[in-house]
Image (cartoon, rainbow, N blue to C red):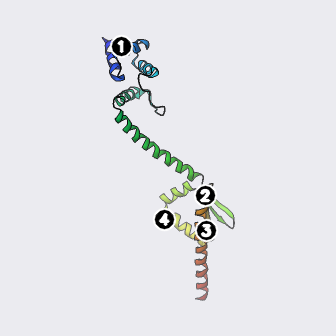
Amino acid sequence: MEDHKLIEKLKNEANISYEEAKAALEKSNWDILDAFVYLEVIGKVQRPSDSIFYTNEYKENYIQSMMTNNKNQENNYNNAKRDNTFEGIFVKVCKIIDICNNIFFEIKKENKVFLRIPVTVIILLLIFSFGIVIPLYIVGLFFDFEFSLSGKMREVDKINHVLKLISENVKKVKGKLKRGFKNG
């Protein structure tokens, strides 16, 4: 009776005939998981994608969900699309973080580098202590510190150009303030 239940369960879950289920179970010593793997090997059941990781605790639940999804291909397509979207966002965020780790923010004075840190750190400082970082940047400009980026990306040169223009304008304002105090 127990063998009959195993055959029926495998037959229903794998969507195969009674004879195929019985033969698979006989070849796998009546182990339903081994029988299912055997059916995957001979091509009777679709294999899971290689990018899926599961622990022993979740194997049976995973197999049941895969069998249900195999019966309903449209649902399977929608679930895969949703999973790929999340994975795509995660991959993009990781790429952005990697790019920011390879671009460095430099603080210089008279061509001597005082500080060189990854842009990722600057972004985190701006997020968590915006009220401190921006005033320090402005004060640094008035004390003739130069700020620049270094890295292999083309956009770094464009940003350095903007940072240089800001520095030059602050020097002009500083010169006007000095002349105003001397004349006044």
Indicate the amino acid at tag 2: Arg
In percent of width and height, residue 133 lies at 53, 63
* Amino acid at pointer 1: Glu
Q: CA distance from mark 1 to mark 2?
A: 65 Å
Q: Secondary structure at mark 3?
A: helix
Which mark is on residue 157?
none
Q: Which residue is tagged 1?
A: 19
Q: Which residue is mark 3?
A: 164
Q: Estimate the spatial distance between the alpha carbons at disc 1 and disc 4, rounded to whole Å.
A: 73 Å
Q: Position of residue 83 (x, y in %)?
A: 41, 40
Instruction: Using the numbered discs, state the Cα–Cα distance from disc 4 to disc 2 in whole angstroms.
Output: 30 Å
Q: Amino acid at mark 3?
A: Lys
Label annotation for residue 154: 2
Count neighbours of disc 4 (C-alpha within 10 A) and say few if under 14, some if 14 to 19, many if 20 or more: few
- Residue under circle 4? 131
Neighbor class of circle 1 (other Cα within 10 Å; few <14, some 14-19, many 20+) is: few
* Occupied quadrant, residue 57: top left
Label 3: how many Cα within 10 Å (few below 14, some 14–19, many 20+):
some
Q: Quadrant of the C terminus?
A: bottom right
Which residue is rendered at x = 38% and y = 15% of the image?
A: 20
Mark 4: secondary structure:
helix
Q: In the rendered structure, which disc, 4 or 3, sits on the residue that comes first in sequence?
A: 4
* Pointer 4 or 2: first along the chain: 4
